[in-house]
């Protein structure tokens, strides 16, 4: 075993590093290290510069493309649009928009009634009464449809609900007089022999030089000498006090303001006040015959309503209208 020679077995392992003699190592021809470093730096330099140049070129190309080929077309400039709009939208406030329906009275009082505040119990907001003075008159003689009145007592079903009377019984308190008849004669339709003043259904309104009564549940809006009484359905009774500087009679004043509407009104007298009433019985023009300093315009305005629900109530208010001198 010990006398045999070991075979030289080849190995895949690399030979062990051998330490060369320094003198021998110096004689080996190798490229100095500085040349390797220089070549390496040049390679890195061009590898960095070339991509940068390519990015710059591509960026410039894209910029030129968008600059010359993708610029939005300029929009035309509108000239004098504001002036054109103003010219087209100007309205002449003194010229009626529809002469077949409305005519305007301008008495130069320039009073505006502010009735724009909101209320929770109204179907429609209060209208704005523009008093230049602007008063609309229906000259078509078309009388609006009356609201339903199932018991025929001259109180509409809406009025029956307002005053608490029985819509199916024409004489709620059983005193022999119909509910509507009692109301227009200043009696409470709920209690026999009780006056309307004591009933609490109506309250007194004191204006500047005049007075009248109105349903206590209605909303009141005042502006100067003028007032609006707003019903729950959006309709309202309006009272406008118009200065009659020339002290004309109501007929002469009306003919001056409405020269083509004379056939639409008739003469009326209420509490020693003389005047005119429209054929639909919704507009009244009244004045003191002796001292006609003012024309009092009282109207029942339906607003957007399609029928008359409070005509009897309006008549009660009219019959109570008096001047302070009376």
Image (spheres, rainbow, N blue to C red):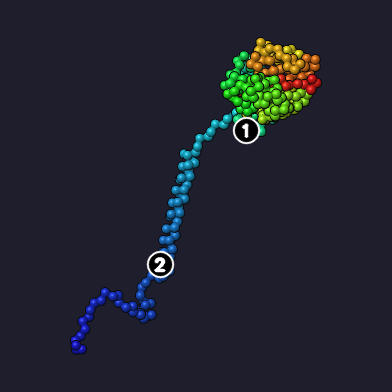
Which image quadrant for residue 219?
A: top right
Q: Residue 323 at what x, y percent from top left? A: 77, 21
What residue does disc 1 label?
Answer: 121
Front-lying residue, 293 or 120: 120
- Crowding around mark 2 (Cα neighbors within 10 Å: few <14, some 14 to 19, many 20+) is few
Q: Is residue 325 visible?
A: yes
Tag 1 near tag 2, CB within 8 Å: no
Q: Where is residue 247 in the image (x, y as percent from the top left)?
A: 78, 16
Residue at the spot x=80%, y=16% of the render?
Answer: 291
Q: Name the element at disc 2.
A: helix
Q: What element carries label 1?
A: loop
Q: Which residue is drawn at 67% across and 22% down?
A: 183
Q: Name the residue under label 2.
A: 36
255 displayed left or right of 156: right
**How many numbered callouts?**
2
Mark 1 or 2, nearer chain start: 2
Residue 245 versus residue 123: which sits nearer the camera?
Answer: 123
Q: Quadrant of residue 220?
A: top right
């Amino acid at each position: 075993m010990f006398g045999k020679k070991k075979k030289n077995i080849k190995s895949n392992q690399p030979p062990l590093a051998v330490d060369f003699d320094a003198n021998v190592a110096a004689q080996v021809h190798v490229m100095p290290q500085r040349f390797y470093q220089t070549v390496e730096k040049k390679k890195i330099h061009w590898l960095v510069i070339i991509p940068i140049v390519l990015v710059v070129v591509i960026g410039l190309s894209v910029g030129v493309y968008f600059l010359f080929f993708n610029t939005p077309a300029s929009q035309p400039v509108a000239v004098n649009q504001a002036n054109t709009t103003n010219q087209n939208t100007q309205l002449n406030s003194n010229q009626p928009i529809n002469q077949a329906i409305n005519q305007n009275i301008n008495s130069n009082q320039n009073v505006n009634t502010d009735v724009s505040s909101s209320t929770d119990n109204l179907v429609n907001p209060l209208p704005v009464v523009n008093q230049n003075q602007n008063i609309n008159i229906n000259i078509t003689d078309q009388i609006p449809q009356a609201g339903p009145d199932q018991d025929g007592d001259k109180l509409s079903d809406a009025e029956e609900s307002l005053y608490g009377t029985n819509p199916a019984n024409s004489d709620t308190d059983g005193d022999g007089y119909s509910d509507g008849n009692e109301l227009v004669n200043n009696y409470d339709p709920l209690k026999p022999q009780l006056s309307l003043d004591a009933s609490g259904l109506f309250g007194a309104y004191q204006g500047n030089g005049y007075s009248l009564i109105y349903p206590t549940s209605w909303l009141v809006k005042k502006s100067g000498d003028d007032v609006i009484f707003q019903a729950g359905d959006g309709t309202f009774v309006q009272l406008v006090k118009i200065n009659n500087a020339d002290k004309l009679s109501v007929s002469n004043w009306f003919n001056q303001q409405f020269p083509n509407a004379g056939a639409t009104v008739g003469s009326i007298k209420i509490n020693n006040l003389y005047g005119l009433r429209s054929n639909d019985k919704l507009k009244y023009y009244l004045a003191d015959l002796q001292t006609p300093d003012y024309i009092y315009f009282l109207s029942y305005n339906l607003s957007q309503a399609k029928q008359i629900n409070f005509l009897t109530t309006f008549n009660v208010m009219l019959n109570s209208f008096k001047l302070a001198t009376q």
